[in-house]
Image: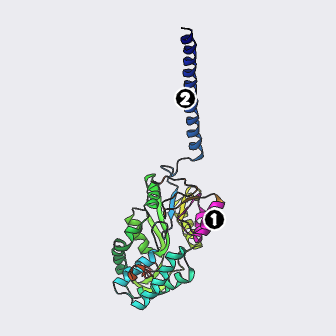
Amino acid sequence: MAALGWLTPRRRSATARSVLAGEASAEAARKTTQEVSEREPEFPVPGDERAAAFFDLDNTVMQGAALFHFGRGLYKRKFFDTRELARFAWQQAWFRLAGVEDPEHMQEARDSALSIVQGHRVCELQSIGEEIYDEYMAERIWPGTRALAQAHLDAGQRVWLVTAAPVEIATVIARRLGLTGALGTVAESVDGVYTGKLVGEPLHGPAKAEAVRALALAEGLDLSRCAAYSDSHNDIPMLSLVGHPYAINPDSKLRKHARRMDWRLRDYRTGRKAAKVGIPAAAGVGAVAGGTAAAIALHRKRR
């Protein structure tokens, strides 16, 4: 009995310690959850109508360059010959291998595209753009980035594509994804026919930031509450304009800059998470031919 009497208090003591340990663990978990919630407030903020999201297109929303995929579709429709195709194929190969936009190659693509669409009607290119999206672009949308855009839409916010691609093509893609609209490069047209000239310059680099700034002013948006997403260091001006910049599938220069600035990173090319996330995850020759072709935006300019 003495042995039993010695065991009983110990059992009670062990039980008390277990209860204490459990209560302490639960309290620590509650505090940790609260601290995480305080560090990472809900974003996007539901119902914030003065907030919006701006997404680059090439290699951010879609694998590869929209300009090149569109060129592939135009080649299929005999808008240009095999000699031009070979040049476009080289440009697309460079884009895929380097993962960055080479200004010289992009300029060549734009010049080629302008000459290709010159004399064609705007409505013709718009219709073809719908077909080309289904043929070459739909399957190249990054699901992860699409989920990020949907998170903004679900929160009641507007979502815009911002791209150097032709504005008509960008608009097709935005509509198919259920987004609000698109900002893109504008090509001159007279009486519904392309002249082979641009209106201004391609929507690239600093021009994107200016387009976002102008749209925000017109729409009554507060840029400090807006988000922007891009893969390219060329878009640092646009990313720096908003309160919530995100580097998506970033090139090396953007990755370094984002880490230095403590911007959030996400990489969908390998499925791995980058160091900082911020938004939930839910949130043949012809193929390379992308070269170009409609390179330039195609917005109607009326007399």
- The secondary structure type at the circle numbered 1 is helix
Q: Residues within 10 Å of mark 1 (few under 14, many from 20)?
A: few
**Are circles 1 and 2 on residues that touch, CB within 8 Å?**
no
Q: Is residue 271 above or below residue 46?
A: below
- Out of 21 and 256, give the one closest to the viewer: 21
**Amino acid found under the numbered disc labelled 1:** Lys
Residue sitting at the far top: 1
Mark 1 / mark 2, whichever is N-terminal: 2
Residue at image coords 56%, 47%: 41
Residue 281 visible in the current orientation? yes
Q: Is residue 106 above or below residue 243?
A: below
Residue at image coords 41%, 77%: 69
Residue at image coords 47%, 79%: 92
Question: Horizontal and vertical percent for residue 71?
Answer: 41, 81
Q: Which residue is mark 2?
A: 22
Q: Which residue is mark 1?
A: 256
Q: Main secondary structure of the magenta part?
A: helix
Residue sitting at the far right: 260
- Out of 122 and 148, give the one closest to the viewer: 148
Tell me the mark number nearer the camera, choosing from 1 and 2.
2
- Residue 132: within the magenta? no
Question: Horizontal and vertical percent for residue 289?
Answer: 42, 82
What's the magenta region? Answer: 231-260
- The secondary structure type at the circle numbered 2 is helix
Q: CA distance from mark 1 to mark 2?
A: 43 Å
Question: Horizontal and vertical percent for residue 103?
Answer: 57, 80
